[in-house]
Image (tube, coloured by chain):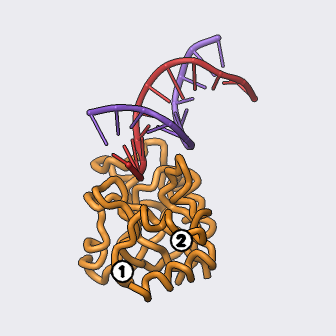
Chain colours: A orange, B purple, C red
DNA sequence: GCCAACGTTGGC
DNA sequence: GCCAACGTTGGC
């Protein structure tokens, strides 16, 4: 099993939104970056867990945990002309964009980006690297367990 | 709102 | 295939 960090602008989809969806699940549509797509298409497995990050907001950081509850499937919004994620180059026969479904697991006490930067154990975290913009990044086993201890201590 | 960093596009 | 121009991301 692998661990991930997924970013979302809370004005689009927040952790509370996910918690309030019917069956607490949502298709992780709208990822339009090849590296992030490849993580979902090729690496994510059913049952993997992901830290849920709020970005482009007043208080960026980790707000919850979700699980991966589907295999990779075509992102439905790429075929929807009314969606801002519509991609005219994509076809049902040969979809360009793939995604997974995620399910709410729990909210956690907010861990700010400033706090995360304080821990030497987390200096390699992708989301803390200068210039990082990837909205889906892998989390190492060590980083995951360190963060679990952080949560338990809050 | 600024701006550094990065990804993508497209002319050549 | 190079690379300048452009658009986007996202912390600050």
Q: Residue at x 59, y 63 (%)?
A: A123
Going from the N terminus, do you reach mark 1 or mark 2 first?
2
Residue A107 vertical placement versus A42 (above, below)? below
Residue A61 rendering spot, x and y as whole percentages: 39, 65
Q: Which residue is mark 1?
A: A108
Query: Which chain's residue wears label 1?
Result: A
Residue to which mark 2 is pinned = A4
- Label 1 – label 2 distance at C-alpha: 16 Å
The location of residue A78, given as percent across then percent down, is 41, 52
Q: How many numbered circles are shown? A: 2
Answer few, some or many: residues within 10 Å of disc 2's Cα (few below 14, many 20 plus, some between 14 and 19).
many
- Residue A73, visible in the rendered structure: no
State which quarter of the image contains the N terminus of chain A. bottom right
Would residue A119 be visible to someone looking at this image? Answer: yes
Q: Secondary structure at mark 2?
A: strand
Residue at figure coordinates x 31%, y 50% from the top left: A83
- At 62% from the left and 73% from the top, the residue drawn is A140
């Amino acid at each position: 099993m692998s661990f991930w960090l997924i970013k979302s602008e809370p004005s689009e989809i927040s952790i509370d939104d996910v918690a309030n969806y019917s069956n607490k699940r949502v298709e992780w549509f709208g990822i339009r970056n090849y590296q992030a797509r490849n993580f979902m298409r090729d690496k994510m497995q059913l049952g993997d867990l992901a830290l849920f990050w709020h970005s482009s907001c007043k208080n960026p950081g980790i707000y919850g945990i979700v699980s991966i509850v589907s295999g990779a499937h075509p992102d439905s919004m790429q075929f929807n002309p009314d969606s801002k994620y519509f991609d005219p180059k994509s076809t049902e026969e040969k979809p360009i964009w793939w995604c997974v479904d995620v399910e709410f697991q729990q909210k956690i006490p907010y861990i700010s980006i400033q706090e995360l930067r304080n821990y030497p154990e987390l200096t390699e975290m992708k989301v803390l690297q200068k210039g990082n913009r990837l909205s889906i990044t892998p989390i190492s086993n060590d980083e995951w367990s360190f963060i679990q201890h952080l949560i338990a201590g809050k």
